[in-house]
Amino acid sequence: MKNTKKLIQAAVLTALACVLTIVPKVPIGGGYVHFGDTVIYIAAILLGPIYGAAVGAVGHSLADFFSGFAIFCLPTFFIKAIMGFVIGKVVYNHTDIMHFILGAVAAFIIVTGGYFIAEIPLLGWETALISLISSPIQWGMSMLSSAVIIPILIKNKNRLNL
């Protein structure tokens, strides 16, 4: 029963990740700022690394597809899966600030490096260099929103039946 509950929670979070990656989005450089990554952090921290990877991979790839960025579906699938998995490995069952910071730093490296590498063959060096500016901005916004939302969810985890 517990696995069914986690699977349903992951499915809801996957849909939420897709929607919050699409709306609202603020264009910056070669990408855009959105709240979808916050959902990956939530999934990884509350459900674990496998669910964090699935939510990131599927939710964000679908968002790329629905937003007209189908060229990024495959890179996004792998980058966000790795991000969700690593965050889950670092932070799952650890609610202290040090683990959260380690997970955040790992996410920064994975997303910034991943999109830089993916954009070189897809869009060229110049655009890839711009992603070295836009990816950290996106990461910072995700960290800020996660730092606000996740402690509230953890504090109320039992009451929310998470």
Image (cartoon, rainbow, N blue to C red):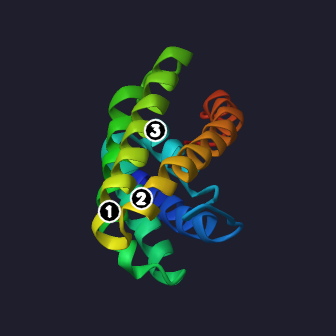
Q: Assign a secondary structure to mark 2.
A: helix
Question: Looking at the picture, does residue 154 appear above or below residue 8?
Answer: above
**Disc 3 residue type?**
Phe
Label 3 close to label 2 by CB (< 8 Å): no
**Disc 1 residue type?**
Ile
**Disc 2 residue type?**
Ala
- The CA span between labels 1 and 3 is 18 Å
Residue visible at 56% across and 17% down in the picture: 97
In front: label 1 or label 3: 1
Q: Which residue is the site of mark 1? A: 120
Describe residue 72's horizontal placement relative to residue 31 as left or right. left
Q: Position of residue 81 (x, y in %)?
A: 33, 53
Q: Tell which of 71 and 155 is nearer to you.
A: 71
Q: Which residue is the site of mark 2? A: 128
In the rendered structure, which disc, 1 or 3, sits on the residue that comes first in sequence? 3
Neighbourhood count class around disc 2 (C-alpha, 10 Å): few under 14, some 14–19, many 20 upward: many
Residue visible at 50% across and 15% down in the picture: 98
- The CA span between labels 3 and 2 is 16 Å
Q: Position of residue 158 (x, y in %)?
A: 60, 33
Neighbourhood count class around disc 3 (C-alpha, 10 Å): few under 14, some 14–19, many 20 upward: some
Q: Tell which of 1 and 136 is nearer to you.
A: 136
Residue 1 appears in the rendering: no
In the rendered structure, which disc, 3 or 2, sits on the residue that comes first in sequence? 3
Residue 8 appears in the rendering: yes
Label 2 close to label 1 by CB (< 8 Å): yes
Q: Which residue is the site of mark 3? A: 108
Describe residue 29's horizontal placement relative to residue 102 as left or right. right
In the rendered structure, which disc, 2 or 1, sits on the residue that comes first in sequence? 1
Question: Looking at the picture, does residue 11 appear above or below residue 103?
Answer: below
